[in-house]
Image (cartoon, rainbow, N blue to C red):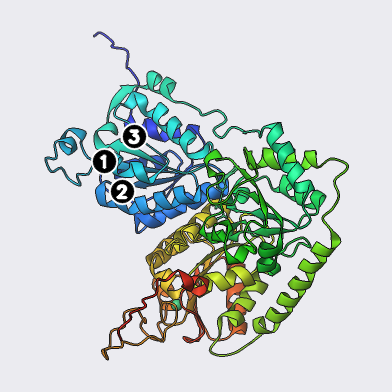
Amino acid sequence: SRQEPERELTDGFHLIIDALKLNGLNTIYGVPGIPITDFGRMAQAEGIRVISFRHEQHAGNAAAIAGFLTKKPGICLTVSAPGFLNGLTALANATTNCFPMILISGSSEREIVDLQQGDYEEMDQLAIAKPLCKAAFRVLHAEDIGIGIARAIRAAVSGRPGGVYLDLPAKLFPQVMDAEAGRKSLVKVIDPAPAQLPAPSAVQRAIEVLKGARKPLVIFGKGAAYAQADDEIRDFVETSGIPFLQMSMAKGLLPDTHPLSAGAARSTVLKESDVVVLVGARLNWLLSHGKGKSWGEPHSKKFIQIDIEPKEMDSNVEIVAPVVGDIGSCISALRDALGKNWTQPPADWLAAINAKKDENIGKMASRLKKNSTPMDFHGALGALRTVIKERPDAILVNEGANTLDLARGVIDMYQPRKRLDVGTWGVMGIGMGFAIAAAIETGKPVLAVEGDSAFGFSGMEVETICRYNLPVCVVIFNNNGIYRGTDVNPSGGEDVATTVFVENARYDKMMEAFGGVGVHVTTPDELYRAVSEAMDSGKPTLINAVIDPAAGTESGRIGNLNPQSTVRKN
Ligand code: ADP
Ligand code: MG
């Protein structure tokens, strides 16, 4: 009989897996279903870590924060239409925060979708994703998978990082092609986020401005944390002697206890500084757009801005010295340009900051030591502050209103990229997704400090935490509701518009339902002991921390953003 030489074949499933692996993308966060269920199975069989969630938004948030932590795009995998839409919130949030991620969604048949003939989960996903992310691509042919994934990676991590959508129609997965041709079609992306050096003239301009400063200040944002230029940043700060503030997710880039940290004198330095160097921090609402009361006299300061995105310059106020490039390159160029004749900032500026710091830290100290029942926020946070001080390499995830704003101020961070929170949108619901990815990507213990309302947005993922046996300790600040658990219905009924939750809810029992450890605590001492034990054991733990329902303030520190009615009828 004639022997036909056997042709080795591959298909869409395997080419996608091979392309991801070739580029070091070894973890997928997702929710299985049609048409990507088998893809997940095969990916796992080929050595990719596949983490299955209960809802796509949390898988997406996990992918996004994985991108922030690793500088590689986090991968989220979803089913079509509804699953895709659930993942889209996380993709938009990632883009807003400049986190690199790729949302890969299976989709229905093009021919049917485009004629709107009513396919299973029919939706023109590519068109819908486009305005909500940095770039969106679709791959129709197996031989284009390599290029498609290469484009998605470059779009996510080069320049200003962000979210990318990759649309993979169901028909692509089983498409067959010659294995050798398939191998050759794959692309290993070389230098996906190339260094971008600042122009020497821009560096010189910035140095001239800095030399004229009497009250200089540096503000680091999460772009600086993302850049992983930790040594260069420390060197610049310590050589220049300029005091600094760290935005929420930049905390720990330098220890919050560093002598040049002006964190405890924030309002003073914002008001009084005369030259401000922004490093990977946007002058958006989180910095009052660089103007108004919190910035002191109008036009009293000059801004220098380091950012990889040239369009960011002058977005809110005039930037007198834009320095465009990656933060590592820019900050070392600035450091070198300080030169031998650099003089340290005036001593009276540093003395004024230190005096304010001492005053504020002193005021806070007694409140943090209060061991009362029910706990108030400061007492409870005092306990958690000690936990992080004793375990500086643990990762802190934080969301809520009061729980967020007060924790940010109270809990000092000591190492870069250890504080993960609600970011640019101040969005609720990142908690469990961030905690899961933080544990998976770093292998470090994770402490998630959650308002009871914030926790509700992703609470079902405690099952995921238990299923993968992750070293995550969730602490719920349980004050019976959103903001405060004390609202009433002004028309006299039982139901309350602003949500007072079930009183004395036992969130700890949720954890026990899935085999994790649940603890109920009512004092800061108990809280400290329970968290320490959880961090030592590495067991999935949820601690229900009872907080006085009357202790908070509405919307935490941003109550002023609520529009007020002047004709309110009661
Ligand atoms: P924060 O909220 O902490 O103030 P933002 O998200 O407002 O931080 O700002 C982050 C900034 O960092 C964005 O403008 C982004 O373009 C910039 N950025 C991100 N990565 C880099 C990088 N590697 N080099 C330079 N700038 C970066
Ligand atoms: Mg609450």
Three-letter code for the amino acid on which mark 3 is drawn: Phe
Helix, strand or loop at disc 2? helix
Three-letter code for the amino acid on which mark 2 is drawn: Phe
Q: Do the residues labelled 3 and 1 touch (CB within 8 Å)?
A: no
**Residue on which disc 2 sits:** 84
Which percent across, then down, holds residue 387?
65, 71
Which percent across, then down, holds residue 331?
70, 43
Determine the residue located farthest toward the left in the rendered image: 117
Placement of the C terminus among the 4 image quadrants: bottom left
Which badge, 3 or 2, comes first in the chain's sequence? Answer: 3
**Residue on which disc 3 sits:** 13
Determine the residue located farthest toward the right in the rendered image: 341
Relative vertical location of residue 448 with respect to residue 118 in this rendering, above or below: below
Tell me what residue is drawn at x 63 percent, y 41 percent.
Answer: 322
Tell me what residue is drawn at x 86 percent, y 49 percent.
Answer: 343
**Residue on which disc 1 sits:** 107
Tag of residue 367: none
Q: Nearer the viewer, residue 110 or 181?
A: 110
Asked whether mark 3 and ligand 1 are closer than 8 Å, the reply comes as no
